[in-house]
Image (cartoon, rainbow, N blue to C red):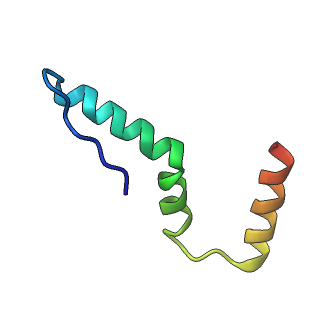
C-alpha cells in the first residue's frame, strides 16, 4: 500500500493528489477493478492478448 506523508506547509489536497498519482502508477486501481467480479478463463486470455497488442 503506498503511503504519503504530509510535508510541512503542504495542503491535504496536494498530498491526496500525490497519493492518487502513486496508486495510478502502481496499477492498484486497475487490479481492484479486475478482481471485483469473476473473470472466466476465456475472458482472461482475451484481455491479456488485447493488453499485449496495445504495447
Q: How many marks?
A: 0
Q: Is 49 drawn above or below residue 19 in the view shown?
A: below
> Could you tell me which residue is drawn at 75 percent across and 61 percent down?
47
In the rendered image, the residue lying farthest to the front is 8
Residue pictured at 28% horizontal, 35% vertical: 16
Task: Left or right? Give the position of 46 relative to 29.
Answer: right
Q: Position of residue 14 (x, y in %)?
A: 27, 26
The location of residue 54, given as percent across then percent down, is 81, 43
The location of residue 1, given as percent across then percent down, is 37, 57
- Whether residue 39 sits left or right of residue 43 in the image: it is left
Residue nearer the viewer, 54 or 15: 15
Res. 42 image quadrant: bottom right
Between residue 53 and residue 19, name the one nearer to us: 19
Residue 33 in the image: state x and y as whole percent: 51, 60
Q: In terms of image quadrants, where is residue 18?
A: top left
Task: Note whether 28 is above or below 44 in the view shown.
Answer: above
Quadrant holding the C terminus: top right
What residue appears at the point 47 percent right and 52 percent down from the top-left corner?
29
Q: Report which quarter residue 50 is drawn in.
A: bottom right
**In the current view of this chain or complex, which residue is farthest to the left?**
9
Amino acid at each position: 500500500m503506498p503511503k504519503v506523508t504530509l510535508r510541512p506547509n503542504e495542503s491535504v489536497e496536494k498530498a491526496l493528489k500525490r497519493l492518487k498519482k502513486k496508486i495510478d502508477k502502481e496499477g492498484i486501481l486497475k487490479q481492484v477493478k479486475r478482481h471485483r467480479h469473476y473473470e472466466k478463463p476465456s475472458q482472461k486470455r482475451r484481455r491479456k492478448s488485447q493488453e499485449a497488442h496495445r504495447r
